[in-house]
Image: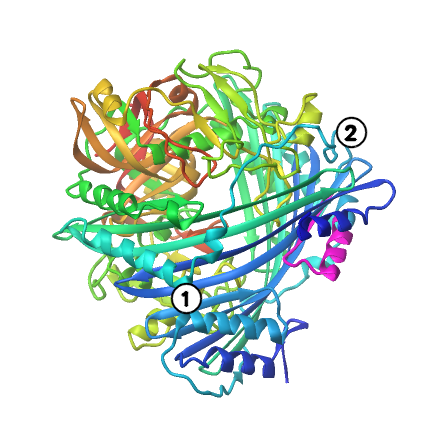
Amino acid sequence: MPVTAGSDALIDQSTLSRALRRALSTGAEFAEVFAEDRRGSVITLDDGRIEDLSSGRDRGAGIRVVSGNTTGFAHTADLSEAGLLAAAEAASAAARGGGGGVREVALSPSTHATPSPVGVLPTSVPKSAKVDLLRRADGAARGAGGAVRQVSAAYRESRRQVLVANSEGVLATDDQVRVRFGVSVVANGDAGMQTGNESAGATMGFELFDHHDVEDMSRSAAERALLKLGARPAPSGSMPVVIRRGSGGVLFHEACGHGLEADHIAKSVSVFTGRVGEQVASPLVTLVDDGTMSHEWGALAIDDEGHTTSRNVLIENGVLTDYMWDWLRARKEGRQGPANGRRQSYQHLPMVRMTNTFLVNGTEDPEEIIRQTPRGVYVAQLGGGQVNTATGDFVFGMTEAYLIEDGRLTQPIRDANLIGNGPQVLADIDVIGNDFAMGWPGTCGKQGQGVPVGMGQPTLRVKALTIGGTAQ
Amino acid sequence: MSELLELAQRVAGWARDGEDVEVYLSRGTETEVRVYEGEVESLSSATSAGAGIRVVANGRQGFAYAGALDEAALTETLEEARDNAGFATAEDWIGLPVPDGASPAVLDLWRDDLARFPASGKVAAALDLERRVNAGDPRIRLVEQATWGDVAGEMALASSLGVTATDRATACFVSAVAVAGEGTESQTAYGYSVGRSPSELDPDRAAGDAVRRAVRLLGARKPASARLPVVFEPRVSAQLIGLLGSVLSGEMVLKGISLFADRVGEAVAATGVSLVDDPTDARAWGASTFDDEGLACRRNLLIDAGVLAGFLYDSTSARRAGTTSTASAVRAGFKSAPGVGARALHIVPGTASHEEVLAQVGDALLVQSVSGLHSGVNPVSGDFSVGAEGVLVSGGAPGAPVREVTIASSIQRMLQGVVAVGSDVEWLPSSAAGLTLAISEMSMSGA
């Protein structure tokens, strides 16, 4: 029976069985074939011109063999039986299993309903329609004011068809379609240039643009840049910080998300090691990682190890309930999932990764949170972040922020990073709004691999965070 | 002629009348070994290859790629690039480079002995490094990961306008992340050594660096906010110097979003700063015979004793600016079309050792690592704010460790504020080399 991902058979089932048998021939306990066919396209507009249209296809398979504590891995762009057998041999040689002999693998094909059905396949839409989106975005931003100096925008689409088969009988496929649109505006004023961005993306087809108007996005980006022309330097030092709903999810991604990944836990290089069942955050905090969130940027039917994703509560009312797991780490602990094994491509080994990570809704009116803050910083838009899981120290950037004075937003402030310590910041969350929203599509980098992740949160306040500005 | 170049030339020959075609092919093998607690955690090996094809017709450019080199894939990719070109905006300056007659530097970036080095030797090297780190200090708790990595890569480029280029390079490294601990506290730091062949690696230095950096952070506190001089260690200054590559891109100037547009001939940095991008210096890990459009790489002086001397250009941006390419086209692999970028930036070293720079500055923050470069540095506004770890220097001597602080300023002020440039150039596997660099004042935000 041919195994299909979408319309193309990546590898047929009998070939998969033979590749797995070859991979196990040196006595390894586990073998896996991960095949991937990825097509992508990017169109960029810059300086008023459609500057670059680029598209391509990359497909291949990674074969993983586990023997004891050692993983052997090899990948190939050759999906023929010969190519797969050669990779299987290389991977099994690398894992250097002790025994030998023949093990047959009975694959049980399973189907997994996608959380993200596609309405309009992006490849079915003419390139001219995508070019038109970019032109409209350019026009809208330039119409936002004479101080707009430059506009760049990018449309990106990708389709990733994956197939996973392993010696435990798993045989699963997924078809992930993602579309993303981003616009960046530069405005020029007396105090130099400023930037404003806006971004939208989802695990869906071209119908993304039924939900997002590129001209509105463009105007928002332009307004952000224009507003920052009058921004003053960010403060330097510790103060209360209110973070608007949505993009602040990056706070949790960095403050504790990475620290709850079981690979960091297993090596005791996380400040959350050994703390399941303990109060690790303010009782207001309930944090969830959910790969099943329909159409969100980190949504997956299966993880990249062939296991069904699920909604997993990581922190409940401030108490740590569980870590995130991949197959390797779960096996060492003698437990099942949840399934958070992901990889950038067939050329990479899987590891524990987040999917869509978010803080659940609170009860406070977000306007009231600002009113109840005599002095502090209101962060309306966050950029990326970075964490050292061993110390828990993390940074994240603000790209739109205001001073809060006497419970009101006053002056816009310039870009800066904020720095805090994960456990301390989680404990210092003292009020949570009732306005939950997911934020922008993110790309999470770990050990050189990037994967799409979603993040979200309602408006919240942290009692004290250090703002890395220059104003005394 | 290499087989890869022959293939590139053959595909470039498929160009139709009225169009120019450029074919970039790359191929490589790589190995990575990770060890943990005396065992091999993973051993990955792979060969990969791919093609990126650019088509220019009537002033419009299209690009497509494929992760394969077979004839069917190349045919399909060329067709796709051709189709993509039809939707781009036409401009006079869009076009592939023509041969410019510059003679390529003779670089020796390939070592045959890397290919002969057995997997068992790679495993042994990673295990050896792990042992050295563990033995380096009683406060080392564990080695989060010790890694061996190697890569041998080959590229070939040919265009229908007669440009041809081929190059190959090897590199290998060992690195380790050390975790030092006391009580409930853990601190981490990495050490590495990189070479073009296994015999060039220095595991002692890699282990020593990881141990020293992790241990000296133990007991780190979050200090009070202050304005103070800041000294960057070479591996940190390399990251900062790397940022200048995009700031000094001619493309940014043309688009009106460069911090330094219209400032050629003016003082943009302290007089001690001379910045060069020189891919023809074989000591640089970004060294390359050709740029990613096939022009011979050359030495480009960007800042001369503080005075802005010029920008980097690829052939498209150069044509638009009315100048010539500085052979600064770079690609992020075969999947990306070329753009402007630096390969081998370095600040011309001064005469003072690391210790002498510290003595000269007296009291300062010595920074050993930074975080959030991608979220806290804005190359358009110049705003600079990053997380930092390091030690406070008092009377020229490194002392109390600090953590959970940010340091902030602006790119413009930092360049003007360079008060000392060390003699200790460190060639890092990145687009920039580092050296000890002292800045007169930055804002440190802490408690």
* Residue A306 in view (yes/no): yes
Q: Amino acid under label 2?
A: Asp
Location of mark 1 (residue)? A340
Residue at 36 percent of width and 46 percent of height: B201
Q: Position of residue B250 (x, y in %)?
A: 60, 26
Q: Where is B261 relative to B201, above or below? A: above
Q: Position of residue B137 (x, y in %)?
A: 16, 49
Please report, as a chain letter, where disc 2 is located.
B
Cα–Cα gap, marks 2 and 1: 50 Å
Q: Which residues make up the magenta segment?
A: B62-81
Asked if badges 2 and 1 are on one and the same chain, I answer: no
Please report, as a chain letter, where disc 1 is located.
A
Q: Where is A168 relative to B51, above or below? A: below
Q: Closer to the observer: label 2 or label 1?
A: 2
Residue B214 falls inside the magenta stretch:
no
Q: Is residue B34 left or right of residue A114?
A: left
- Residue at far top of view: B266
Q: Where is B94 relative to A427, above or below? A: above
Label at residue B92: 2
Q: Where is B184 relative to A290, above or below? A: above
Residue B70 falls inside the magenta stretch:
yes
- Residue at far right of view: B17
Q: Position of residue A1 (x, y in %)?
A: 64, 85
Helix, strand or loop at disc 2? Answer: loop
Residue at 73 percent of width and 54 percent of height: B77
Q: Quadrant of the C terminus of chain A?
A: top left
